[in-house]
Image (cartoon, grey):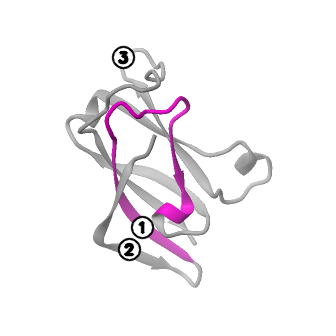
Amino acid sequence: MALTQSGIPDNRALLGPSNQLRTYQEAAGVSDYPTGGYPINASQVELSEIYNCWLVGQNAAASAYIAQIIFPAASFTNPGPATQVLLKLLVSTTGVEVAAATNLTGAIWNLAFIGY
């Protein structure tokens, strides 16, 4: 249930005194998809809090799925950043989440994160 994360070189930007933009490559492992999505903690992308996250690219293997970034409900009840987001994958033809332990080997997503 762990993505292999790799920072994309020379793809960081300071956005004022406290915010940063960072881009990471997220590679799925062998049959490790957890129900509800892969958790991505802020510390895994060298941040303390995540304000925003979005998909900026994917390879051919990942294009068979719709990737959604889900923030915890508390981020919307009391607006603010989150310490974790979920990369949730949906089957593109039905809008239903892929089953736990689905083999997504070879699927790679590039995600951009804004936070501090």
What residue range appears in magenta? 19-44
How many circles with numbers are drawn on the protein? Answer: 3
Q: Residue at x 61, y 64 (%)?
A: 49
How many angstroms separate mark 1 from mark 2 (CA)? 5 Å
Q: Which structural element holds mark 1?
A: strand
The residue lying furthest to the right in this view is 78
Residue 12's label in the rendered image is: 2
| Kind of residue indicated by mark 2 | Arg
Q: In this view, does 32 lie to the left or right of 41?
A: left
Residue at image location 63% in from the left, 58% down from the top: 83
Q: What residue type is labelled 1?
A: Arg
N-terminal of the pair, mark 1 or mark 2, is: 2
**Tags 1 and 2 touching, CB below 8 Å:** yes
In percent of width and height, residue 38 lies at 48, 41
Q: Which residue is tagged 1?
A: 22
In the rendered image, which quarter is residue 82 located in?
A: bottom right
> Which badge, 1 or 3, comes first in the chain's sequence?
1
Is 98 inside the magenta-drawn segment? no
Q: How crowded is mark 3: few (under 14 residues within 10 Å), some or many (20 or more)?
A: few
Mark 1 to mark 3 CA distance (whole Å):
31 Å
Residue type indicated by callout 3: Thr
- Direction bottom: furthest residue: 17
Occupied quadrant, residue 104: top left
Residue 60 image-quadrant placement? top left
Label 2 element class: strand
Dot 3: element: loop
Which residue matches tag 3?
Answer: 93
Residue located 71% across and 50% down the image:
75
**Is residue 22 inside the magenta stretch?**
yes
N-terminal-most mark, 3 or 2: 2
